Amino acid sequence: MATPAPRFVPIQNVEGKAGPFYFRYDEFGADVRAAPHSHTWGHLNYAAHGTMQMETEGLRFLSPPQYAVWIPPKVVHSCTLRHAVVYRSIYITRDLCERLPAEPCTVRISPIIKSVLADFAARDVHEPTTPADLRLAHVVVDQLEVAEVQRCYLPAAASSALVTVLEALQANPGDHRSLAEWADSVHMTERTLARQCQRELGMSFGDWRQRLRFLRAIDALEAGRTVQEIAFDLGYSTASAFIAMFQREAGTTPEQYRREFCGIA
């Protein structure tokens, strides 16, 4: 059977907009892509429901709903949506991007930014023109300026040994082998593998595995699976241990997250 051609989402053309802001709101189904493109404006990409994957300059950015992906002006980027998402995007003219990150990155979204996005979406405000709406839009820029920045939520490895370990984990996130056992599987010491994780990923092996499990948990919650099923599949001995991990990452329980971000009662 032939593989179906990918479905592509339309690219927003902001080049003729008056600025300094343009807000976009969309809902996209699963298994769609945005082809590689760029803008002269900065571009904040946020999934209010669901998780999106963006690619740029050889890097892959995965962002759950408490994070967004920032793309500076003129940076070529593309997007892959494995699951349905409620999409929010802010385009910011180049002059206002000088205070914002100069490289693509993930940024933690503050409650203030979420509230402004929700308010503008509810009122269908795309190009703020009133003094009050312009002030709110500038508040978003102020919030982005001080937002927690990460190079990538789930960074990729470069060395062949670490690539092997991470690919095995992605194939089976429930694998609970220790760092020492993983190191032995690729014929190196635990200390060497730990150093490679910090050097290449910018985080510990345990933190990377927890983030992977968290992202897989989001997918499973969106698919309607129970907390107990997800906990078992991800290698947790009890549902409470899984819930504790999820709360550390999301700041909320899996069921609360499901109601707020997945649109599932």
Image (spheres, helix red, strand yellow):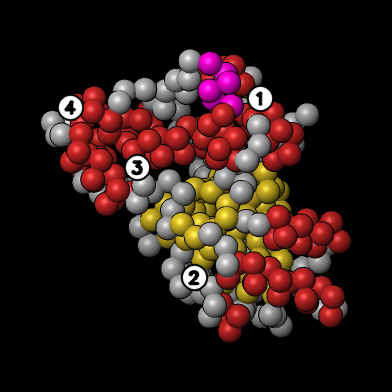
What amino acid type is highlighted by mark number 2?
Pro
Q: CA distance from mark 2 to mark 3?
A: 24 Å
Magenta includes 18?
no
Q: CA distance from mark 1 to mark 2?
A: 36 Å
Q: Residue at x 35, y 57 (%)?
A: 58
Task: Give the mark nearest the N terminus, 2 or 3.
Answer: 2
Task: Give the mark nearest the N terminus, 3 or 1.
Answer: 3
The answer to the question of whether label 1 and label 2 lie on touching residues, with beta carbons closer than 8 A, is no
Q: Which mark is residue 131?
A: none
Residue tagged by mark 4? 184
Residue tagged by mark 1? 224
What amino acid type is highlighted by mark number 4?
Asp
Residue 50 is left or right of residue 187, and the answer is right
Q: Quick one: SS at disc 1?
A: loop
Residue 132 is left or right of residue 86, and the answer is right
What amino acid type is highlighted by mark number 3?
Ser
Residue 12 image point, x, y percent = 64, 66
Q: Which mark is residue 204?
A: 3
The answer to the question of whether label 1 and label 4 lie on touching residues, with beta carbons closer than 8 A, is no
Residue 87 image point, x, y percent = 67, 52
Q: CA distance from mark 1 to mark 4?
A: 37 Å
Q: Residue at x 55, y 40 (%)?
A: 249
Q: Which residues are magenta?
A: 238-243
